[in-house]
Amino acid sequence: MAVQTTELAVVGAGPGGYAAAFLAADLGMQVTLIDPKPHPGGVCLYHGCIPSKALLHVAKVIDEARQAARWGVRFGEPAIDLARLRAWKEEVVGRLTAGLGELCRRRQVTYLQGRARLRDATTLAVQTEEGEEQHVRFAHAILATGSQPATLPEVPMASPRVLTSTSALALSELPRSLLVIGGGYIGLELGSVYAALGTRVTVVEVTEGLLPGVDRDLVSVLARRLERQFEAILLNTRVVAAQETPEGLRVTLVGPDGREGQQVFERVLVAVGRRANSAGLGLEATRVEVDARGVVRVDAQRRTAEPTLYAIGDLTGEPMLAHKAAHEGRVAVEAIAGRRVAFEPRAIPAVVFTEPEIAWCGLTETQARQQQRRVEVARFPWAASGRAVTLDRPEGLTKLLIDPDSERVLGVGIVGSGAGELIAEGVLAVEMAALATDLRLCIHPHPTLSETVMEAAEVFFGQSTHLYRPPARARAT
Ligand code: NAD
């Protein structure tokens, strides 16, 4: 049997794993990166962020083309060439994953295609694509195996009519009707794609609102638009059974009044969260600790209870976001390199890539309430933004959560077209401990949506140029 030794083994080549492997190579470590896929990329590139964003871009174009009738330009109904659309999405994925493969090669990271399992705290057994087993001995390893869609016992997951985010992104056909179970990130993003392509989409969410945990003033703007795009949004509703019939899945739903109803859907997408991929990794052969949900326990350097093993990304729990994984990966590598580092971000941005997008970072109003923390919220409605009006998207909102004593920006929330791009300034403000006056005094380009961040800071001082508020109280600036 082939045995290779390496300084650092990275298991899983998603955004967390490859970011870690690349930095380690840049720091001069000898690195082996292991993943079953032919190139690095992980779920994010092959079955997640990237293909979904390619399709959401198409959905946005369709949406805007429809809206253009309001501006005096008519395109007619879109003709969807599903095979071409799929091919384009795959071209995007292929280009990016091949690019990562090339970056791997240039950095002289050894890429091992196969599935790895720990034999002990310093050895991995890798099952290669050819069915051979190879052993990798390492000084340190970073576990970055990600997560997979959670399943629902009430739904026959093996049925070809039941989709997860992975199969929904394969876009093998356009069903006439789709039930999306779960009104979270995935449900709303993929629901938007299918709705734009012509499928009648119903969303069922067990809690009382879409995107639980996200501030309601942001969600309500999105919900208003989705109510027009989706066939129905059923809140406080549970799926209690789903049965295969020749016409589709007959789904039994229990609504807020406790009454049962049945509806038939051609396809059902289950998007009720993700589960950490810790099973099958051989962790039982080590001292690594795993909680009841399969999440690996790590310290501030992302070190597990086994000193040679680190874990990052979805494997370490929420928020399950690619950029959080990449950052953790870099922290773990620096810790292994002996640097004094810790993973202690003040602001991990989150973006829901619907239309409009919702983005936030740092403290949210929901968290402030839960923590009984006194904050002042400065809101700037996009109806007062020239740029938003030129885009015919005045429904957006930018808000800042500000500490009333220190005037520090603690959190930023945005709903509106392109909110995901705009939130980066919020991340910088929160991480750099910016004061509201810093955002107010930075000259923002006109006419852009970025001005809404500056004007929200002006609102805090009661001095927004484009928003008149009767002078309730003067704040020294
Ligand atoms: P999620 O946690 O965002 O949403 C799941 C939703 O399903 C919740 O609203 C929950 O209340 C609901 N739910 C749970 N059980 C249910 C049931 N039985 N019936 C009806 N509703 C039910 O999870 P997700 O959308 O599956 O996404 C998984 C993870 O992937 C998220 O944690 C997110 O971090 C990540 N993700 C991020 C992005 C992004 O950054 N844009 C996009 C997709 C996924």
Image: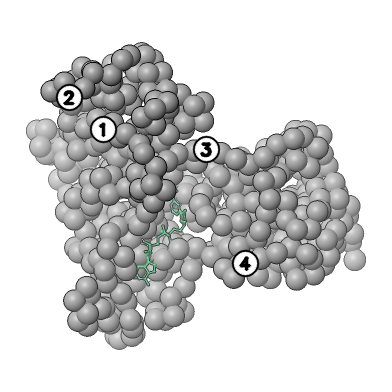
* Percent coordinates x, y for residue 238 in the rendering: 30, 74
Q: Which amino acid does label 1 sit on?
A: Arg
Q: For residue 379, which numbered disc appears in the image?
A: 1
Q: In which quarter of the image is the C terminus?
A: top left
From mark 4 to mark 3, how far is it between C-alphas?
A: 25 Å
Q: Which amino acid does label 2 sit on?
A: Ala
* Percent coordinates x, y for residue 107 in the rendering: 75, 36
From mark 4 to mark 2, how far is it between C-alphas?
A: 51 Å
Q: Which amino acid does label 3 sit on?
A: Arg
Q: For residue 346, which numbered disc appears in the image?
A: 3
Horizontal relation, residue 55 to residue 348: left or right: left
SS state under label 2: loop
Find disc 4 in the rendering and name its residue.
Answer: 291
Q: Is residue 334 above or below residue 244?
A: above
CB within 8 Å, label 2 to label 3: no
Q: For residue 472, which numbered disc appears in the image?
A: 2
| Residue occupying image coordinates x 35% and y 48% | 369
